[in-house]
Image (spheres, grey):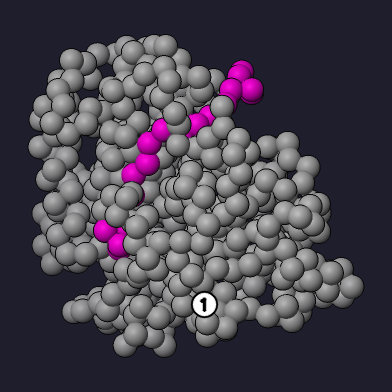
Amino acid sequence: MHHSRRVVVTGLGLVTCLGSGVQNNWTSLLKNECGIRKLTGEDCLGPCHIAGTLPPGVLEEAVSRIMEQQASLRGLERQLDRQAMSRTSLLAIVAAHEALQQSGWLPAPNQTSPRNFATEDQASCRAGTYFSAGLEGVEEIVKSLCLTQKKGYRGMGAHVLPRTLSNMPVGHISRAWGLRGPTMSANTACASGLHSVGEAYRMIQYGEADMVVAGGCEASVLPWTLAAFSRIRALALGYNDQPKLASRPFDSQRQGFVMSEGAGALVLEAWPTPLHLLDALHRRTLDHQPLAEIVGFGRSADAYNLVSPEPTGSGAFRSMKAALDDARLHDLNQVEHINCHATSTPLGDVIELAAIAKLLEHYPRSASAPRIAINSIKGHIGHCLGAAGAVEAVYSVLAAKHARVAPNRNLEQAVTPEEVCKLGHKVGRREADNQAELLFTRTFMPTQSRVAMDSRSNTRLMVLTNSFGFGGANASILLSNWVD
């Protein structure tokens, strides 16, 4: 096993309610824009009438463009089966395609490739896929159930099954572009996307693959899911006429999260790039610079409640600590930014802050170091459920690379130290008060666009990103800007 192998990010792909494409999303985030919209028609049968859906025509246009480019790849001309794909799988294909193009596995648009992707060579057999969804198949199951009730057996379509299996997005990606290495899918609810990236990191670190396209996807904005999440009081229900104000992480007026759809993809590689992989890549040279490096991965379980986080933040703290320990960090001096899971729920946001406060108490930080920027981009894009962690990992790579932090949208009156202390008093009043003081003196929550991090030359600039899921699943990844 290759525990010492470095793992870098060489490609990114993104599609959210802000639109398709990494650059488009990054620009919109820095401009503090919001993609949450008012729903119409039968989607409004329940009490929630808002969601982060893709702009009209964006997915169809992106898929058509990919299908055209696919026709020019030798050995892959018929490997994209549109009829067998659910909307979730289509989102995964769009994000993965962009990431694979940037990494060089796929040729750039209008570029011909001499490679035969149908060939079972060393590069393809060492290229893996790890992609996950939270609620894949709900739409197909509901539709097919209605049809079979009306028409009986004949109402069951031939493509229903492949559109409902949770590992189909990863299967479509692997098949579409000749990725013959390990192919895996995980489901840890809203932590699925980040767990996928973290497990792909481990896969490369341990020598099981040399390249992995990893990420998460979700297309669950449906009457059934909106009703189900409304029933457990998880959604924001008081902003139906003001959709762009509904998702407000860390704000005193937060009511719950806003459900969204989307997908995020990252291409991870062993570094230095193995020569057999380098030979298979397009437009790549030995001096190619990665976008970022993954330096730590942590996971934990709350073992508390199926749909509510452990109230002291212990599980989230242990996940972040595991990521820092994995990176062999003994202090927080290089951690400039924490991208939070914070979904805009009254309890969850404060619990995550309490966990960060514990982290600040556990790890020293120089008094001369700048305050750590804390944010959540869910104010801009809502909560993409199983895709959220991957989407936010893409954002975190960009934040580390460009030394920029997206603002906290809709943050008008932030969580108070008293709220954090109240949670912490369950583990001791004096300890909780000390942790809250550390939190509010050593961190800040930016509300302005294009807030710069301290980018010192030849110094690692680290970003910690979190995802937490129903069932008590927690994941944290520590990313760094690229420093050779």
| Left or right of 453 on screen, residue 177 | left
Q: What residue is at 41 percent from the left and 79 percent from the top?
A: 246
In this picture, residue 32 sits left or right of residue 448: left
Quadrant of res 117: top left
Residue drawn at x 32%, y 34% as measured from the top left: 102
Magenta stretch contains residue 9: yes
Location of residue 420 with respect to 173 vertically, above or below = below
Determine if residue 128 is in view. yes
- Amino acid type, callout 1: Leu
**Residue under the point 11% across and 27% down:** 72
Pointer 1 residue: 411
Is residue 468 one of those drawn in magenta?
no
Quadrant where the C terminus lies?
A: top right
In the image, residue 467 sits, relative to residue 448, either above or below, namely above
- Residue 348 image position (x, y, % from top left): 60, 70
Q: Which residues are magenta?
A: 1-19
The residue positioned farthest toward the front in the image shown: 457
How many numbered marks does the figure carry? 1
Tell me where residue 53 appears, x and y as whole percent: 28, 66
Between 367 and 466, the one nearer to me in the picture: 367
- As rendered, which of 460 and 212 lies closer to the eye? 460
Residue nearest the observer in this picture, 259 or 448: 448
Residue 289: image quadrant is top left
Principal SS element in the magenta part?
A: strand
The answer to which of 416 and 196 lies nearer the viewer is 416
Percent coordinates x, y for residue 91 in the rendering? 27, 50
Q: Position of residue 257 (x, y in %)?
A: 46, 73
Q: Is residue 201 above or below residue 161?
A: above
Using residue 46 as the reference point, say whether residue 232 is left or right of it: right
